[in-house]
Image (cartoon, rainbow, N blue to C red):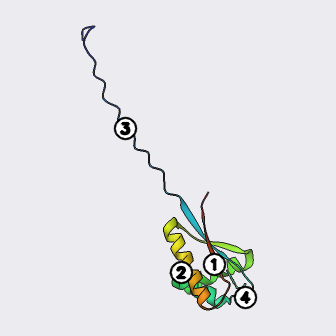
Amino acid sequence: MRDNDTVLKPKKQTELKLDKPKLYKVILHNDDYTPREFVTLVLKVVFRMSEETGYRFMMTAHKLGSCVIVVCAKDIAETKVTEAMDLAKSRDFPLMFTAEPEE
Ligand code: TYC
C-alpha cells in the first residue's frame, strides 16, 4: 500500500437500542372476609391454576399478607387484575389484586 492511498473503514453499524418493556407483578392481598374457597376459585379461573396451586398461592397470601401471582407484560397484568377484581366485586368480596412494576 502506498502512503497516499485512501483507506476505507467499514461503516460502523448503527446500534438500535430498544428499552426492554417493563415487567409487572400481579399481587394478591389478604383480607379477613373473602372465603378461602373463593380466592382459590379466582386463581383457577383468571390465572389458570390447578386447585392445588391456587390453594397454595391463596394460603401464602393468607399467611404472609400478600403473594406475587405472576410476572408479565403491563397490559396482561392490568387485564388480569381487572378480571379478578370484577369477579370479587360481583360477589361483594373485598378481595384485592394489584399490579406493580418489577424492580
Ligand atoms: N384471609 C381470608 C380468610 O381467612 C382468606 C384469604 C386468603 C383472603 C387470601 C384473601 O388473598 C387472600 N377467609
Q: Residue furthest top?
A: 3
Amino acid identity at mark 4: Tyr
* Residue 73 visible, this angle: no
User: How packed is label 4: few (under 14 Cα within 10 Å), some, or many (20 or more)?
Assistant: few
What is the quadrant of residue 28 in the picture? bottom right
Q: Earlier in the sequence, mark 4 or mark 1?
A: 4
- Measure how far apart labels 4 and 1 are at the Cα level: 17 Å
The residue carrying mark 2 is 83
- Which percent across, then down, holds residue 26? 59, 71
Which residue appears at 28% of the width and 18% of the height?
Answer: 7
Look at the numbered discs 1 and 2 and tell me whether their residues touch, using CB distance below 8 Å: no
Q: Earlier in the sequence, mark 3 or mark 1?
A: 3
What is the tally of numbered marks visible in this picture?
4
The residue carrying mark 3 is 14
The residue carrying mark 1 is 57
- Which percent across, then down, holds residue 86? 57, 84
The residue carrying mark 4 is 33
Amino acid identity at mark 1: Phe
